[in-house]
Amino acid sequence: MAGQILPGHVDPPTKIANAYLRRIDHAFGWLVDAPAAALVVAEVVMNFTGVMARFVFNHPLEWTDELITTCFLWLTMFGAAGALRRREHMRMTTLVGLAPKVWQPRLNALGLLAPILFLVLLLNPAIGYAVNQWNVQTPVLGLPDTYRAAAMPVGITMMILAAILRLARFAPRDIFAAFSILLVVAAALYFASPVLMAIGNDNLIVFFVVLLAAGVLSGVPIAFCFGLCTIAYLLDTSTTPLAVVAGAMDQGMSAVILLAIPLFILLGHLIVSTRMAAYIVEFLSAALGHVRGGLSYVLLAAVLLVSGISGAKTADLAAVAPVLIPEMKRRDIHPGEIVALLATSGAMAETIPPSIVLIIIGSVTGVSMAALFTGGLLPGIVLALALAFVARWRTATDTNLPPRAKLKTILYRLVLALPALALPFVIRFAVMDGVATATEVSTIGVAYSLMVGLLIYRRFEWHRLYPMLVETASLAGAVLFIIGCATAMGWALTQSNFSQAIATFLGQVPGGRYGFLAATIVVMVFLGSVLEGIPAMVLFGPLLFPIAVSFGVNQVHYAIVLVLAMGIGLFAPPFGLGYYAASSIARISPDEGLRRIWPYLGALLGGLIIVAAVPWISTGFLK
């Protein structure tokens, strides 16, 4: 699971060293987190100002867009540094946890040394890239682009310091063992360079299959695996300057549409802090809680509705679980059933707008966001119905049911929930009807949530405001840094004609478009489990979409199939990170759901096959 610190973590040998290290780390935390939180606030204020100027006063402020773009890269890099400091970058630790006790701290140390190596190699090219951007000026304010691009070397320096501070907590023998592993791999690649160049594109298997898989399975954060493999490939097989890596990362992280990611993450925190999500769940519980399998239906409906507010699946599950899971446990529903349903509901809702994954795939492929948001709604409902069918079957012996709530109670909770229930519909219709972009509507959602929380519900946890801003920057930084590294890796693969090889291979799949869709489902379920969905989308989306078009597959339909297949892999044990995140949110051991999740996954797969076979489900409501 991302951010997990496994046993074997060793503090410095003396209490004095430990105390000094804690003080330094605390001070460094303020140095990273305070600017990140301030940048989140600045992005919200500037974006909201631009929206108001455009839609209320009909006087667009073009300079706000330039400042937003400049601040956005700084937010990404400070957020990525904060995520590395707290070890919140996405990483696969399942196999690390199964390693012998003596090797676990060594692999955890490797998970810090490998990022340090990548960042050190990238620092000087990033400085050169930022300096070269001086002659590029913004059209309205006339600011040199160096002010924006300088965020990369500053952020890289912050990340190096964060990783070193974390590494200082490990025993010297574990650091030495991890360093030895890196040294052996680097030496092997160096001496094998003539052979690797001689075999042509077959060397891609060494760098982007063997080396990448070894890094991911060893617990190295996925973003840094992408970056290291890309730099190793360029250093060993070409004379391409590493500044192109910095440029590709900048391009990947700087798309304005991606600003919706931190804003929707913040929105997810706000609906919890203002109890908007709780009011939705309480209304659904009053309406459906008395029927057999009622709480399962409530969970599915709540995740659907809350997913229409926040695009972050972890935030969605965290908003619903604390309200529902205690009641499900009181009704003696098996903990394995609870965690299985919670995890698969996360996969079910991957396409419910506003989905961060849809935002990302729209960014990297150029498919209309309004079309993706329109096309993603009905497939999510199809999968919800499939899960509801299984949930009812699994609760056939559920007799511990409460009495039906009085109509007065249901209506009272409906009235309380109405301001919260209105938000997902505002978001959907604003984007689908072209009234606002995904970024603009996320800002409107933040303003609406604050207004509802302060004026209607009169509930806002002010003491949670700073942590919310920090957590927003950290998660957004981790996600966006993956996008940057995956963009650089995708550039390297494209330059090597890898996309043509993929096209040739998939073009020979028997069965035409349906054979291609079936192959896509298999590949994306696997990649979603191993790589996590977002990097898989950024890396393979631009490569696969032209092939889909050549088969006559609608791009929106194909995007929905991709996202749903990835979601199944993401939330499927034993490797899916989303499954372990759901277990952590539910505070239930992952082992409890291992035997009980398969019928739910089967329902998701069946629903996905229906969606893939019937394009109208994804495209029927497109204009």
Image (cartoon, grey):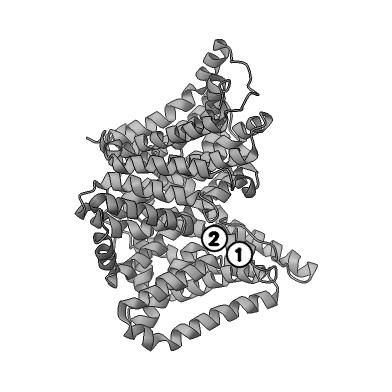
Cα distance in 3D space between marks 1 and 2: 8 Å
Q: Position of residue 154 (x, y in %)?
A: 48, 66
Task: Please tell me in which quadrant of the rendered image residue 403 appears.
Answer: top right
Q: Of the residues shown, which amino acid type is indicated by label 1?
A: Val
Quarter that holds the N terminus: bottom right
Q: Of the residues shown, which amino acid type is indicated by label 2?
A: Met
Can you say whether 41 is above or below 457 in the image? Answer: below
At 30% from the left and 42% from the top, the residue drawn is 613
Q: Position of residue 198 (x, y in %)?
A: 32, 86
30, 404: nearer the viewer = 404
Image position of 608 (left or right of 314): left
Task: Please tell me in which quadrant of the rendered image residue 3 appears.
Answer: bottom right
Circle 2: is it few (<14), some (14-19), or many (20+) Cα within 10 Å? many
Q: Position of residue 240 (x, y in %)?
A: 32, 78
Residue that numbered label 2 is attached to:
92
Q: Which mark is residue 77?
A: none
Quarter that holds the C terminus: top left
Can you say whether 302 is above or below 93 in the image? Answer: above
Q: Give the mark count.
A: 2
Give the SS element for disc 2. loop
Can you say whether 398 is above or below 531 in the image? Answer: above
Give the SS element for disc 1. helix
Image position of 359 (left or right of 184): left
At 65% from the left and 47% from the top, the residue drawn is 589
Q: Which mark is residue 96?
A: 1
167, 106: nearer the viewer = 106
At 33% from the left and 83% from the top, the residue drawn is 199
400, 281: nearer the viewer = 400
Q: Confirm or deny contact between disc 1 and disc 2 (CB under 8 A).
A: yes
